[in-house]
Amino acid sequence: MNVRRRHISAVALTAVAALGFGTLTACSSDSAAAGDTGSFDVVASFYPMAFLAERIGGEHVHVTSLTQPGQEPHDLEISARQTAQLEEADAALYLKGLQPSVDEAIGQSPIATKIDAAELTTLEEHGTEAGHDEEHGDEHGTEAGHDEEHGDEHGTEAGHDEEHGDEHAHEDEHGHDHEGGDPHIWLDPVRYAEVAEGVGKAFQKADPDHAADYRKNTAALVKDLKTLDEKFRTGLANRTTDVFVTTHAAFGYLAERYGLTEEAISGLDPDTEPSGARVKELQKIAKEDGVTTVFYETLVSDKTAKTLAGDTGLRTDVLDPVEGITDHSRGEDYFQVMEANLTALRTALGAR
């Protein structure tokens, strides 16, 4: 199905097909242009959004990701041909504040259904390089029961940020405009489930002929995410330390959800080099808090993590922010990689 069918010239089709956009396994294996597939065509900004679209849309959607497998999503720059592809889609699913070029392209496109995942849950500020809080208070994380106290404030409709966005909006020290706060919401299964519910409702509205299937698929996905949340809760319940060190401040929501403390070498920008003062601070933190591991990512160089680990006598391991699935990923989809993350965290934190 295509809600907004347009005529595309043969030349335009050839140009778009030549892009070779990365799609997920459930998508068509060719590079058919969005808007010419006979399905509900969804252009997703990067893997976590594409995964939602595929699980919720099932057989009724054709999903194309703007970010190719192995590409660091923060660095994506939209081309003119990708902009043309966006214009032929039925829906765009993205996360405002993570990829500025995507935000701009979608904002200027005539797509009728624009789904901003940042509007479907609450965003908070994480990832600063403010000093280590010796007491590990609210600045770094909360106890595991946090969401039980504040659960209602997380489940909101798409218009939530219109009320509260301004009070959180900021630009981090690296110049990335993270409107509404830290964008890495998919690493918290509870917030990701909230986004899934919002996406499901948007699909039902945009493609009512298949609303029942979208509703069913959304419910199944939310159930799986709740199971994942419980695995993290039980798996991390008995641990010897709360502190873990990462190269990139992507795990603030996960840390908050399970009462952990993330200490990032860099801020929200994975490419930023840490200051000498920050490195010394992390060395002190590692010694005081029984840190055993410096985590690095699959899509970003491990040089900084290995340097810090070498200087402090720590080991290194992968903690994957699941921004894309490649041959180097510890799993074939979001759930498999997140369970691998849980295993890595349990080892690093001394969980029993």
Image: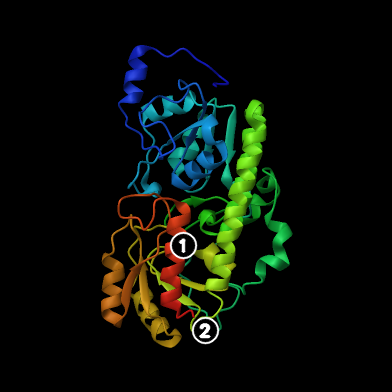
The residue lying toward the viewer, choosing from 228 and 113, is 228
At 53% from the left and 39% from the top, the residue drawn is 53
Give above or below for 315 relative to 117: below
Q: What mark, if any, has residue 134 been given in the picture?
A: 2
The quadrant the N terminus occupies is top right
Mark 1 / mark 2, whichever is N-terminal: 2
**Type of the residue with mark 1:** Glu
Residue receiving disc 1: 339
At 41% from the left and 76% from the top, the residue drawn is 348
In this rendering, does residue 243 appear at all? yes
Secondary structure beneath dot 2 equals: loop
Q: CA distance from mark 1 to mark 2?
A: 30 Å
Give above or below for 63 relative to 320: above
Q: Position of residue 315 (x, y in %)?
A: 31, 76
Q: How is the image coloured?
A: rainbow
Residue count near mark 1 (Cα–Cα under 10 Å), binned few <14, some 14–19, many ≥20 = some
Secondary structure beneath dot 1 equals: helix
